[in-house]
Image: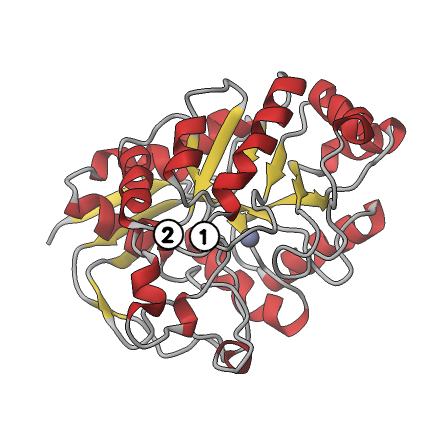
Amino acid sequence: MKTHTLLMPLDMHLHLRDGVMLENVAPLSAYSYSGAIVMPNLVPPVATREDLLAYRERIMAAVPNDYFEPYMTLFYKNYDKAFLESIVDEITAIKLYPAGITTNSEGGVSSFDIEEMRTTLETMSSLGIPLCVHGETDGFVMDREAEFMSIYELLAQNFPDLKIIMEHITTKEAVAMLDKYPNLYATITVHHLLLTLDDVIGGLMRPHLFCKPIAKRPEDLDALLSVALEAHPKVMFGSDSAPHPQHKKESCGCAAGIFTAPISLQLLAEIFDQFDKLDNLQAFVSDNAQNIYGICPEFKEVTLEKRPFLVPENYSGVVPMFAGEEIGWAIESVD
Ligand SMILES: [Zn+2]
């Protein structure tokens, strides 16, 4: 049986939510990942020291028996220098959402006025705090990410020492930016390495494949695969696993988000194996992130095996991607 072992897998973009949902989903990530960048878009968003430390404690309480580091993030707003200096050791990044663009982002940035943002972003540069960005405008849904490229360029040019992570990229335009600016990096999800818009709405509408940014065109999928499979040193795996209760997905107002946390490593192994690139998976799922963020995760060794795995219909009421279907790889052991 073909196997493949990964060391210290990292999920560099994860939604753990809060309350009962947190208790249900956090153990699934903690089982197979050494750590994850935890998104701050709770209600209200994580934007104070007290909220951040309390959220970290709730996460640790939800994963009592696992080695798992929640890399904490603050919700971007303009913070003063003294505050950022006081919290730099508690956070791994700050996450910027354009206002109203996705789940719980109402308090995000509504205009990208560089001068208004300068103090915060320059302080982040000098303290070495990366800026993670949900890069979409409020334009036509298929064009939102490509339209955001000019804002990435503005940020990259004005703050050359700031590490800017283009989160969950979905387009060939975003892929092209990686080699244009030394301070632009990216995360890529597993679902965007599998889907185009056709899979979501080309036949019957598939609510569990509906997410933001929406899956795009075949040429975008090809561009994403090209940098992921080669483990381009500026790209990292970030699942954007985004659990919603089943009734919020299977509803007349379907919430955006795909739940992949319990199957993401298996799917990655399947994709990289299909393209005969398994040797690059370690860099994509851990080494690149360690280099970019300068982090040293807890030791964890995950061995995957090439055998059919039947994806459960749901995990505590959350329906995962490929629920009830067979995928090609399974987790064999975690040490
Ligand atoms: Zn997200």
Q: Nearer the viewer, residue 288 or 171?
A: 171
Residue type at mark 2?
A: Lys
Which residue lies at the image location 67% right of the left edge and 29% below the top edge? 129
Marks 2, 1: nearer the viewer: 1
Image coordinates for residue 149, horizontal then vertical, percent: 53, 34
Q: Check the image and tell me how it is coloured.
A: secondary structure
* Between discs 2 and 1, the one toward the N terminus: 1
> Closer to the camera, 83 or 200?
200
Q: Position of residue 316 (x, y in %)?
A: 49, 78
Residue under the image location 23 percent in, 49 percent down? 271
Q: Is residue 224 above or below residue 54?
A: above
Quadrant in the picture for the N terminus: bottom left
Q: Is mark 1 within 8 Å of ligand 1?
A: no
> In the rendered image of this protein, does residue 246 appear above or below residue 279?
below
From the image, tell me which residue sits under label 2: 216
Is 122 above or below relative to 185? above
Determine the residue positioned at 18% across, 66% down.
Answer: 308
Asked whether the residues under the numbered discs 2 and 1 touch, taking CB atoms below 8 Å apart as contact, a structural biologist would say yes
Looking at the picture, tell me which residue is in the foreground, 322 or 290: 322
Residue 229 falls left or right of residue 307: right
Q: What residue does disc 1 label? A: 142
The amino acid type, in three-letter code, at marker 1 is Met
> Quick one: SS at disc 1?
loop
Residue at 48% in and 47% down:
143
Q: Quadrant of residue 196?
A: bottom left
